[in-house]
Image (cartoon, rainbow, N blue to C red):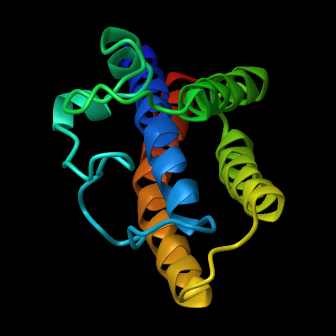
Amino acid sequence: MFKYLVIATIILAFYVLSAYATTDIIRLLKGSKTPVYAPDCYCDACGNKIRLIDQIPIFAYLFNGGKCHHCKCKIPSFDFYFEIFFLLGLTVTNILLRFSLIGFAATVAEYELAKLIFIIIKGKREDSFAKNLLISLLTNVLVFLLIGALYVMLAIVRAKLG
């Protein structure tokens, strides 16, 4: 039973990671005014801080009709589809790899590869790109260490169950 609780927690972490990925990548792209280390998210159109409840991936987009809570401007559908892509991609990869440590390594590789692809496609940001990329990578290390701890817990549980 505990094994399934850890797997559910990993999938929940993927859900949160999908929103983080969108924010991380968008802040690295050309034209972004928000530094990667900013703790809050802001609407590109009106500049208002996005409420925490509106930062819940996928559901917030659907609940608000794809619009900003404050100014009612349309949120790019790219954000919505990107979050779905990440959530499904990471989950399917790990189901196929049975939530193993190899699955964790694949998760890190999939995340960083997607980030690299979108930066190449959309073009790197002009101001302090190297600094922002380094901060992003360091933040990602911390995020993946936390997620990696879940995989280690799962491996321990599996080893004890035989």
Q: Residue at x 25, y 62 (%)?
A: 39
The answer to whether any part of residue 45 appears in the image is yes
Name the quarter where the C terminus is drawn.
top right
Q: Residue at x 30, y 30 (%)?
A: 68
Name the quarter where the N terminus is drawn.
top left
Q: Is residue 104 left or right of residue 123?
A: left
Residue 79 vertical position relative to residue 59 in the rendered view, above or below: below
Provide residue 35's location: percent of width, then percent of height: 39, 73
Nearer to us in this view, 28 or 18:
28
Q: Is residue 83 left or right of residue 39?
A: right
Residue 117 vertical position relative to residue 127 in the rendered view, above or below: above
Q: Residue at x 31, y 15 (%)?
A: 64
Residue 28 placement: quadrant = bottom right
Nearer to us in this view, 1 or 89:
89
In this rendering, the count of numbered labels is 0
The answer to whether any part of residue 156 appears in the image is no
Nearer to us in this view, 38 or 4:
38
Residue 6 placement: quadrant = top left
Q: Residue at x 69, y 29 (%)?
A: 94
Q: Is residue 145 left or right of residue 46?
A: right
Nearer to us in this view, 134 or 146:
134
Provide residue 2's location: percent of width, then percent of height: 36, 19
Provide residue 43's location: percent of width, then percent of height: 32, 46
Residue 108 vertical position relative to residue 33 in the rendered view, above or below: above
Provide residue 128's location: percent of width, then percent of height: 54, 89
